[in-house]
Image (cartoon, grey):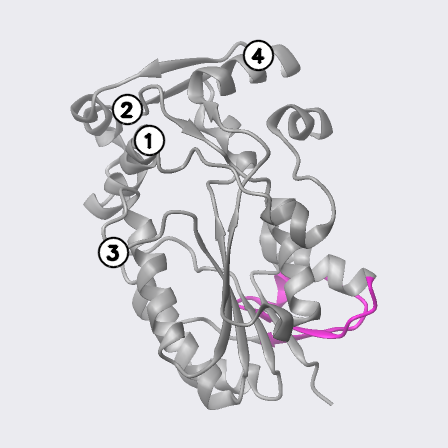
Amino acid sequence: MNPRIAVTGSTGHVGGEAARLLSNEGYEQKLIVRDPARAPELTGASVARAEYADRKAAVEALRGSEILFMVSGAEAEDRVDQHRTFVDAAVEAGVQHIIYTSFLAASPDATFTLGRDHWATEEYIRNSGLNYTFLRDNFYLDVLPLFAGDEGVLRGPAGNGRVSAVARTDVARTAVVVLKDPEAHSRRTYDLTGPEALSLGEVAATITRVTGRETRYEEETVEEAYASRAHYGAPGWQVDAWVSTYTAIASGKLERTTTAVRDLTGSEPIGLEELLRRS
């Protein structure tokens, strides 16, 4: 018998945590990975190799599974095409329900350019005939300290905007609730946020206070942001994504908080201070 649940992204943070939690609760699952050698060893988990862009391999990997946790693919210029190929494979393989990790402000004209990818993927899944649940995560709380880099400077055109960033563990916990009873969440969209909305100045101050690592926020104009990132030699779409991370915060569209994590999991999402103390 094939496991009813298939999980992607198990070599990463969100998919890996979701897979671990499912295993701990005694659920069988199939881990869909690009490199089987990197798949976590979990009780009740089998492993199948497939990439989002390889429809034939994806069909074989997904066959027999009814519920799919589809963690959005790695950032790439053709990510939407990869997602569409994988969704087509899920339909062909007989998957019945997709739980997809999207983005809080996903829309065709989202300020955060990659939010447009998420909207396009959502629309494709909606039109696939499959049942679906969308987990629209805000930016990951775990990543905010990494924005400071070795210099300890959060630098970008975020202005005084605030972001209700959500911890990856809270996204994983929420996903597991849906995976265990997908019918109860069919055709629902959940906006997942942390408990508070912080400016990047407040983020920097919290990092300094909790970790002792001096961190500050340095505001840039959009033009300065593009110029300061030019030395990386990244393609234009990638630089657009980097800069629009900050302009999306400045827009005010990422500051609202929701109770979705608490409502679904029964416990409050963690905030930045708690996350840093756990690290």
Q: Which residue is mark 1?
A: 246
Query: In the rendered image, which residue does mark 3 sit on?
Result: 108
Tag 1, which secondary structure?
helix
Mark 4 → mark 2, Cα distance in angstroms: 21 Å
The answer to whether 262 is drawn above or below residue 144 in the figure is below
Query: What amino acid type should be assigned to the residue bearing mark 4?
Result: Thr
**Label 3 is placed on what type of residue?**
Pro
Magenta residues span 25-48
Q: Are marks 4 and 2 in contact (CB under 8 Å)?
A: no
Residue at (31, 16) in percent of width and height: 219
Nearest to N terminus: mark 2 or mark 1 = 2
Q: Name the secondary structure under disc 2.
A: loop
**Earlier along the polypeptide chain: callout 4 or callout 1?**
4
* Few, some or many residues within 10 Å of mark 2 (<14, 14–19, 20+): many
Between 234 and 118, the residue placed more toward the observer is: 118
First along the sequence among labels 3 and 1: 3
The residue singled out by tag 4 in the image is 208
Report the quarter where the N terminus lies.
Answer: bottom right
Percent x, y of residue 246 = 33, 31
Q: Quadrant of residue 91?
A: bottom left
Residue placed most toward the observer, 256 or 25: 256
Query: Badges 2 and 1: C-beta atoms under 8 Å apart?
Result: yes
Q: Is residue 190 left or right of residue 120?
A: right
Contact? badges 3 and 4 (CB < 8 Å): no
Q: Is residue 177 visible?
A: yes
Q: Identify the residue shown where x is 73% and y is 58%.
A: 20
